[in-house]
Image (cartoon, rainbow, N blue to C red):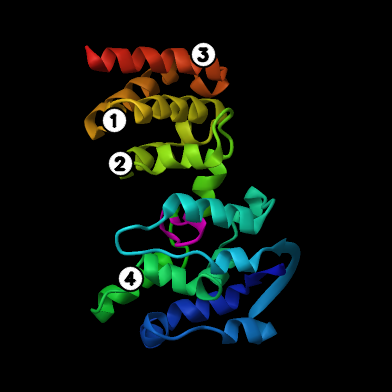
Amino acid sequence: MMKMRLLKTARIKELLNQVPENLDLYRNGDFDFLKIDRSYFIETSHEIDENKLSMMTSGKKDHKEVENCSMIYEALGALTHYLARDERLWIYLVHTDLLNYSRQRWPIPDDDEKAAKHIREHFFVIGARGFERNNAAARLWWMASLCSRVNGLALEVALTCLLHQYDVRANIIERPTTSQSANVFSAILKKLRESYKGDKSLFERDKFRWVMRELNLRGGVKLLGALSEEDVQEILDECVLTSAS
């Protein structure tokens, strides 16, 4: 176990500005100086499992998303959402303990201009969706955190359903009305689980988008977030049945 570290904001700005000149380090080198020189980081009292982080890998065909989501969630322990929204944590990890994983999962383009843009997107935290969607490490933790709230489904099962189809995942995570309410999110994941065990028809792009639109339309009237999971499930069942007619 080791103490969690946060990369200092001034150092983040330096790294961000130096991306073009550090392309060789991103492609083949390392940023070990960030771990050695204490002027680069702030050490917290929160402990993380560095060994688990070192075990994370990604291949060209198998990104091991479910496994890596579970592993980073376990490795970071009881991380608060406040700390999980701190870019200093993720940028430090991606440049140190998770550097090899990050460039395996998000291979850096050969073209230097494209490479610089790619690195800023996946090795830093840029924009409103930088945490949940783009940062190589943060996105994994946030997906695991969401799935950990689903009552009655093991974390790996919930993650398998969420990650089975990209468009489905994007539609859920990028809609605050579905991702921020535990009851709504749980109802959707359980319905996806039913479909995953059956014909997987709910994972079809057009069908799922239609169901989500219907759910949001009804939510505008009944305020889904205020309903119990059972009530949301009943409305969701109606939406799915209507989509089949």
Q: Disc 4 marks which amino acid?
A: Pro
Q: Disc 2 marks which amino acid?
A: Asp
Determine whether, in the image, residue 72 is placed left or right of residue 200: right
How far separated are the C-alphas under marks 3 and 2? Answer: 25 Å
Q: Position of residue 39 (x, y in %)?
A: 67, 84
Residue range of the region highlighted in magenta in the rendering: 130-139
How far separated are the C-alphas under marks 2 and 4? Answer: 22 Å
* Lower sequence index among marks 1 and 3: 1
Q: What element carries label 2?
A: helix
Residue 152 within the magenta-colored segment of the rendering: no
Determine whether, in the image, residue 129 is placed left or right of residue 2: left
How far separated are the C-alphas under marks 1 and 4? Answer: 30 Å
Q: Which SS type dominates the magenta stretch?
A: helix
* Lower sequence index among marks 3 and 2: 2
The reply to whether residue 97 is in sight is yes
Q: Is mark 3 on a helix, strand or loop?
A: helix
User: Which residue position is annotated with label 3?
Assistant: 231
Q: Disc 1 marks which amino acid?
A: Arg
Q: Disc 3 marks which amino acid?
A: Asp
Q: How crowded is mark 3: few (under 14 residues within 10 Å), some or many (20 or more)?
A: some
User: Which residue position is annotated with label 1?
Assistant: 209
